[in-house]
């Protein structure tokens, strides 16, 4: 029976093997989380790269338990450090932070309605404070669990739930004000 605890890599070969086992399978998840934290796609990729470098440096101290949570914690720290180093961002592109996908249709009217709905959701999402926007993106768009988001953002699960509720409420209210919600969606 294989142990869930990672061996302590004493050599670069052992470190590479541990990295391949625990980190490489999570790269897609890291990229999705980074896109929720960073509005710019290039910044998100840079954040993932910094996370991977930091993870490789720390792989010898990793116990093998919960690699995604460990990596999201590294990412959160890297994100905070990057935010401290950079100047305040000027106009952000809300389209870079989220995409809402709906099934394709050949009906031009239905496609136009979906496009208007998608634009309204992106606009509503962009108006949220960063803390709420990040939670909504991570849970609703990327499919992370409340626990994973709580770990990634270093907040209690109750805070994740509260921010998600408030963010969804704002988005729902904006869509309702724009006449884009059906009575069931209210």
Image (cartoon, helix red, strand yellow):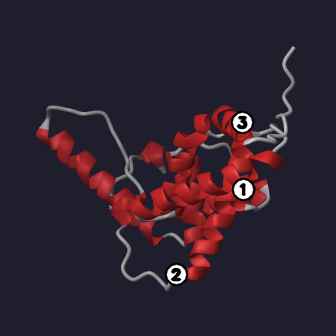
- Tag 2 residue: 86
Please state which of residues 23 and 109 is positioned toward the viewer in this rendering: 23
* Residue at x-position 86% and y-position 33%: 5
Q: Is residue 117 left or right of residue 82?
A: left
Q: Is residue 168 visible?
A: no
Q: Quadrant of residue 10?
A: top right
Upstream in sequence: badge 1 or badge 3: 3
> In the image shown, does 105 or 152 lie closer to the viewer?
152
Label 1 vs label 3, nearer the camera: 3
Question: Which x, y percent locates residue 42?
Answer: 40, 61
Residue 168 percent coordinates (x, y): 54, 57
Residue at the image position 69 percent from the left and 42 percent from the top: 68
* Secondary structure type for disc 2: loop
Question: Around disc 2, counting alpha carbons within 10 Å, would you say few (fewer than 14), some (14 to 19), or many (20 or more)?
Answer: few
Q: Are marks 2 and 3 in contact (CB under 8 Å)?
A: no
Q: Which residue is mark 3?
A: 18
Circle 1 — which element? helix
Marked residue nearer the N-terminal end (2 or 1)? 1
Q: CA distance from mark 1 to mark 3?
A: 18 Å
Which numbered mark, 2 or 3, is in the foreground of this view?
A: 3
- Real-space CA distance between mark 2 and mark 3, rounded to the nearest whole angstrom: 32 Å
Residue at numbered disc 1: 73
**Residue 27 on image: x %, y %:** 55, 42
Image quadrant in which the N terminus is located: top right
């Amino acid at each position: 029976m294989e142990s869930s605890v990672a061996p302590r890599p004493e050599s670069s070969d052992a470190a590479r093997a541990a990295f391949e086992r625990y980190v490489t399978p999570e790269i897609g998840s890291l990229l999705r989380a980074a896109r929720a934290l960073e509005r710019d796609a290039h910044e998100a990729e840079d954040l993932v790269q910094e996370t991977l470098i930091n993870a490789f440096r720390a792989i010898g101290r990793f116990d093998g338990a919960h690699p995604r949570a460990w990596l999201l914690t590294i990412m959160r720290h890297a994100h905070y450090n990057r935010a401290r180093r950079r100047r305040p961002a000027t106009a952000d592109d809300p389209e870079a932070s989220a995409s809402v996908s709906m099934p394709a249709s050949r009906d031009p009217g239905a496609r136009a309605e979906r496009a208007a709905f998608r634009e309204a959701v992106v606009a509503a999402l962009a108006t949220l404070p960063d803390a709420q926007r990040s939670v909504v993106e991570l849970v609703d768009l990327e499919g992370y669990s409340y626990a994973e988001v709580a770990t990634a953002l270093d907040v209690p699960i109750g805070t994740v739930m509260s921010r998600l509720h408030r963010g969804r409420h704002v988005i729902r209210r904006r869509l309702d004000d724009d006449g884009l919600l059906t009575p069931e969606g209210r």
